[in-house]
Image (cartoon, rainbow, N blue to C red):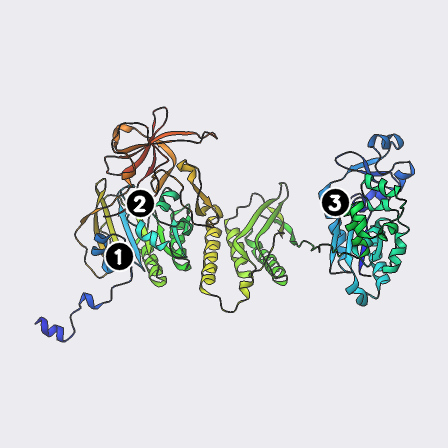
Amino acid sequence: MLDQLFDRGQVWQRHQYSSPPAIDTGFATLNQHLPGAGWPAAGVTEILYPQHGIGELSLLLPSLAKLSQRELWIIWVGPPWRLNAPALAAAGVDVRRILVVSPAQNTGILWALEEGLKSGAASAVLGWPQQASSTQVRRLQICAAQHEVPCFVFRHQRPGGQNQQTPSALRLQLKPLSTDRVEIRILKQRRGWPAAPFPFTLQRCPAFRYPAGSTPSTGDAGRAGGLGGSGNK
Amino acid sequence: MNWLYAHLPHLYAETWLPQFHTGEPVALIRDHNHLIEDANDAAKACGVDVDMSLNTAFCLCPGLQVTPRDPCRQQRALERAAVIASRYSAWLGLDAADGLYLEIASMKRLLGGVAQIQHRLQLALQQMGYSAVIAVAPQPKAARLLARAGQHRCCDQEQLIQALADIPFTALGIEAKTELRLAKLGLATVQDLVQLPSGDLSYRVDAELTLYLDQISGRKPWLPPPFKAAERFHWYMDLEQEFESLEPLRFYLAQGVGQFCRFLQKRCLAAQVLRLKLQHRHRAPSCVDIKLANIDNRPESWQYMLNSTVNRLELAAPITAMQLSAALFEPLDDRDLHLFNNVSQECDQKKTQLLNRLSARLGIHNVHFLQISTDPRPEFQTICASQPAAQAQRPAAALVAPLWLLPQPQPVAIDRYIIQRGPVRLTSGWWDRNAAHRDYYVAGDSGLTTQWLFRDSDGTWYQHGWFA
């Protein structure tokens, strides 16, 4: 039966399709779970996170470090807090390539995201919209696909509502398990099914630089430096 | 006969003091030492003279009107005169406060001879109210010497040497000591000096004086640095009625901007800022800068920026007049002349375009790049700059800091947290008011987030960032 269907060419085999262009995430575990073994290079990646400070940004750092080697800019639109340039530089990101745009309103954020995608001057666009309807995400998705720019949309997730449909190329949900582990659930991926959540080790803070223990004593501020960011090894 | 020198002895007074040529006594004083610098005929008739102290002058002439000299206006007066003179020569040099060099050898044929040029320039300056002494000589410095000595003449090399016989060497303005020395040698005029062998003069008297004499006689070349008149763009429109919105005036503004672009294109220049000044009836005028991300002279860029600026603008009061002005220009890069732009230039153009669009709609202060400073305090390490740093920057020696910083450290209750790592001590900033004595900790809270806390010297705990 199956053979007949094969003969008639009526079976879609996943591996026949060339995998979509992707950007290496820098994490072997994550690459395995993502279609094309990386972030969609021409599409919107939505990252849902329940609260700040669970490693939502560290997830991107290795790929941003690589993208920042290109002449183009990485555009950050409407970041929720002040971006700390030395920490980025320590993670290997070239801060010269970073353009921070902070519009006052949500519409401004969406507009700036779209402009960034269309401009041809960006190697990646990151956005923190307060709200983005399905239509607005579709617009971004179309722009990103047309101009072949990766777009990362961070969405502070309120309880519930993660199951609404999305036109984005990839949608991830993060859930903290412990201080250096998160659970990643792929809610949507192109050419694939939503996968079961998997645990993922993500070092949010280069903790080894700090002395362990909690007794307040003198420390040496001047020595620390160099590596920051993340590693999954 | 190459060079013409116009000396305008009363330039400042003639430009800025309209009463100078009336019958009232008027004097100009130097700003720093209150000595008379210039006086009109009426004042001189009372005995007021140059280099006289102000008190003496007032004793001689109680009704004297006195004005101090402003160096800035002095320069502007000279530039005005230079613009008039620029009709007669392409190479114009400014000299000190009140003199102009003109190269005229190349203009002789066009303007009908040296005497003609001299005459026409004299007339042109006279019409503008300037009295001038004009001399022509083969060397610029020689012409200057003649004009400043009050010799209104035109001479070639031979005549020059003769003419120098009429000028005492005190007109050279050399040091009193040297002057005395020359007088002891029995020398009296500049001609006497010029005819001496310059090697000996240099060795025995003064090397600088010798160089000056050589430049006068033409044994050594010297040319004045050329002067270029500053360009300004100015567009003004008076409105017949008061307008409460710029909306109906968009068309006129667009015309003004169009003129501006043509102005730039004609001169192969580009600009980054155009100032829009709006006059109100009962208020001080308000100014808005129309600013591009990079220099440009294309109408579409400027029109787009004008529209976005006008969209964002809220008028403080009804307007009665509008004005566009620009004074800062840059020569256009030659890259625009290439037929086939290479990729990186195309990319630069796209970047500029994006910056323009973003800053037009969101405001220039909402779009910035990052630079890293050397300050050890985390809150001062990131600088928001309008341009990316020229070279790759690495933090010299830094705390291991999180990616997100709070705009202000927030006081927190420490009992909610579990300290994971720490402390790292930071003591810095003793040189200004924001001294920091902090112990930094990495801490987690019940929501499994990782935060950056510090304890102040007085024991208060603050959150400073998120390890995101």
Which of the two marks, 3 or 2, is nearer to us in this view?
2
Circle 3 packing at 10 Å, graded few (<14), some (14-19), many (20+), is: some
Report x, y in % for residue B32.
74, 35
Q: Nearer the viewer, residue B315 or B266?
A: B266
**Amino acid on which disc 2 is placed:** Gly
- The disc at residue B74 is 3
Q: Nearer the viewer, residue B370 or B294?
A: B370
- Secondary structure at badge 2 equals loop
Marks 3 and 2, how far apart in space? 61 Å
Instruction: Choose the circle earlier in sequence order: 2 or 1.
Output: 1
Left or right, B395 with reference to B352? left
What residue is disc 2 on?
A229
* Picture residue at 53% right of the left edge, 67% below the top: B338
B294 in relation to A82, above or below = below
Q: Nearer the viewer, residue A109 or B320?
A: A109
Left or right, B260 with reference to A22? right
Report x, y in % for residue A165.
24, 55
Letter of the chain that mark 3 sits on in the rendering = B
What residue is disc 1 on?
A38
Report x, y in % for residue B433.
47, 29
- Secondary structure at badge 3 equals helix
* Picture residue at 36% right of the left edge, 30% below the top: B438
Report x, y in % for residue B377.
41, 35
**Amino acid on which disc 3 is placed:** Gln
Marks 2 and 1, how far apart in space? 19 Å
Q: Residue furthest bottom?
A: A8
Letter of the chain that mark 2 sits on in the rendering = A
- Secondary structure at badge 1 equals loop
**Amino acid on which disc 1 is placed:** Gly
Which of the two marks, 2 or 1, is nearer to us in this view?
2
